[in-house]
Each structure stands twice: as C-alpha cells, then as structure tokens.
Image: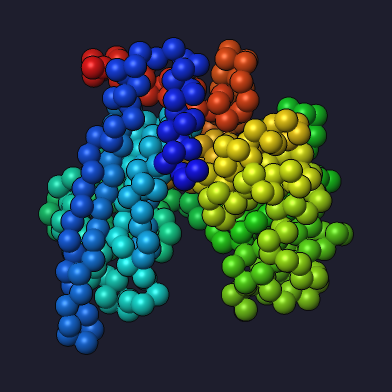
Amino acid sequence: MNALAATNRNFKLAARLLGLDSKLEQSLLIPFREIKVECTIPKDDGTLASFVGFRVQHDNARGPMKGGIRYHPEVDPDEVNALAQLMTWKTAVANIPYGGAKGGIGCSPSDLSISELERLTRVFTQKIHDLIGIHTDVPAPDMGTNPQTMAWILDEYSKFHGYSPAVVTGKPVDLGGSLGRDAATGRGALFATEALLNEHGKSVAGQRFVIQGFGNVGSWAAKLIHEQGGKVVAVSDITGAIKNEKGIDIESLFKHVKETRGVKGFHDAHPIDANSILVEDCDVLIPAALGGVINKDNANEIKAKYIIEAANHPTDPEADEILSKKGVTILPDIYANSGGVTVSYFEWVQNIQGFMWDEKKVNDELKTYMTRGFKDVKEMCKTHNCDLRMGAFTLGVNRVARATVLRGWEA
C-alpha cells in the first residue's frame, strides 16, 4: 500500500471514529490547491534545462500551510499529496497553528552545480512567490534541500515582498534561523520516547535501541539517547549496518561518519546485513530512514517491544495489525517526528516577533509541546478505545474538522 492509500485509510478510520459527516470528510481530504510550474534555467555550459516544480497546499483551516520542499528525481504526485495531507494532521497533533503543504522540484541535486541549484531555486521562487507567504504557506527544507536553499528562497521572495525572514523556516541562523532547529526532529523523537517509556514505568537509561538511518534525525536521536544512558546496539545507513551488543560508542561513530561518510567499517562494532537491522534484538526500534520498511514480510520477526516512527510512514497497515497482535507498541510518525515542525514554528514566531530565543528556551518549549502532545494522544485513545496511531489521527483530524466548521467552511 503506497503512502497516499495508507494516509487516506487512516484518515477514513479516524473520521469514522469521530462520526464526521460524509461531506465534511470529503472536503477535508481534497487539497486546497495544487501548483505545477515549469522551471527553465541556463546550465553552466550555456545549454538550457527544464524542470518541473510543484507545491501541494492541503489545508489552511488552522493557519498558514507548512511543509518541506524536496529536490529529488522521482517526485511522485501521490506521495507529495500524502505528505501534504500528513502535515495537516501532524501540525494539528502538535497543536501548532498551521495546515499542511509539500512540494519540490523533479531534479537530481547531485548532478547540478551549486550555481545551477541557486538559479533553479530562484526561478522556482519567482513562479510561486505569490502563492507562498508568511501567513499563507511557509516552506522548509526536505530531501535534497538545506538551509542554503531556504536562504535563496528568502532572498528571491524578499525582492518582491520586502525582507521577510518568516517566509521559510530551517534557515541559516545568520538569516533568522532558530538555534536547536538542526537537532529538533531527533530531540523530539527522544522526548516522545521518554513520554512513552515513562508511561510504562521505564526510562531511556538501560534500554537497548536499534536505529535505522543515520542522517540528521537518526544521528541526533542516537547521540541524545546515548547521552541519556540508553544503549544503542545497532545502527544502519545507506553504506551498511553495524552492531555491538555492549552498546556502540556514538561519539566515536560520529567522528567515523564525518571522515568516511557512512557507518560502514566502524572499528568498534561488527558489520551485519543491512536488511536485518529491523529484526535485531532490542527494546526500542527507531526507523529513521525511508517509508514502508516495516511490512508484512518482516513484521513477524521484529523483536522490539516499542517502535518509535522517526521516519514518515515507515510501517505498512498490514504490519501494523501483525505488530499490534504481538503486543508491540507503535508511536506513530505524526506525533513521534513532529519535533522538526514544532521548532520550525518556534523559528517563525521568533522571526515575526523579531526576538530570538536562546537554545535552552527552544529545547524546553519543545519538551513541553511533545509531553503535552503525548497526553492529548492518550486522551483520544481512552475516548475512542483505540491504539496510539488512531489516537493521534483522531486528535489531528478532530482539531482540523472543528476549525473548518467554526470558520463556516463545511460543505
């Protein structure tokens, strides 16, 4: 089942639990606007190249739309639709005043020079500058984009609308980016894990963790878990997978990854098959890489008691059913990885106020939001007698539905 089908399925189950009217249900699913633009740029060799840029703006009942911009060769419209919709529910679960959006450009960033990427980003911004904005739609980095990409968007947008740092988040700190943004998704995943384990009378210290993915989210989660006394026993990334039963020294692993650009070959752990990472023996499994990795083929073999979904949509619905029968507790992506968008919200707030926070305030506020978010999800689980995924979906969908009705938008 692809990401869009799974998201739609979860939405429909939540709508049924909430007893939503069918017309309202339909209007919540349809995107507010889909934008597709042609971006033609001169390449460094003087030839012209054309790329397709797009933006799906899903819902703005609770505030401006918010979501990443990705540069990737295979940009699937269905996936972008699913991710835009997921952002609507995610921002509602986090209780921040946004709706969902997603977009990007179909290109291979590794095949383009820095100056070509800059020209492409600026042309894309010229095409969509009237459709994004501080109180309309606020982009952020995603796959293949970074703070520099956001800096170019900010600069190009400001040529049309005056200096507007709040038009994008995930910016360099020198241009109004927030301290703590880099670690935010990983730190949020740690706070979510703490909330879940506390509820079961446990703490991070002494638990054995396996982390799939050692990019921004996975590496920060590993570092912070290690600092809290958790034992990271296996890690994988695009280069391979490693394991050490006694616990991997994360500080040394960071140095190794910086030098070799991957976990492969790390001296203090032995290599294992990357495909077996998800079924390694551990207490807590954190998929922090791609979607759809936990499926009906491997769900039966998973040994973890808890799964923290730091990636988007890592668990297929079929696997969900198998795991819940086994008694595995899954903390769903729309809550577990909402730390990033929550600190993006803090960045936007700081830009609008023109008053920047120190890193301690950012982290303390994030902990407050993540802890409160977990309580809200649990409350919905009790009300509707459902698992954490449905608890999170009913919470998000209910907040958006209420805002839609209060604004008089229901069909």
Q: Is residue 140 visible?
A: no
The x and y percentages for residue 268 are: 80, 71
Name which residue lies at 44% across and 38% down.
5
Residue 137 x/y as whole percent:
27, 42
Instruction: Return the x and y of residue 380 as percentages of the image width and height.
Output: 56, 18
One can see residue 244 in this view: yes
In the rendered structure, the answer to whether residue 126 lies left or right of residue 377 reads left
Q: In the figure, residue 72 lies in which quadrant?
A: bottom left
Q: Quadrant of residue 138?
A: top left
Residue name at image x 19 percent, y 64 percent: 39
In the rendered image, the quadrant that contains the C terminus is top left
**How many numbered marks are there?**
0
Residue at horizontal 34 percent and vertical 34 percent from the top: 99
Q: Is residue 211 left or right of residue 45?
A: right
Residue furthest toward the left? Answer: 160
Residue displayed at 75% across by 52% down? 279
Q: Image quadrant of residue 7? A: top left
Q: In the figure, 174 relative to 77: above or below?
A: below
183 sits to left or right of 232: left
Above or below: residue 356 compared with residue 235: above
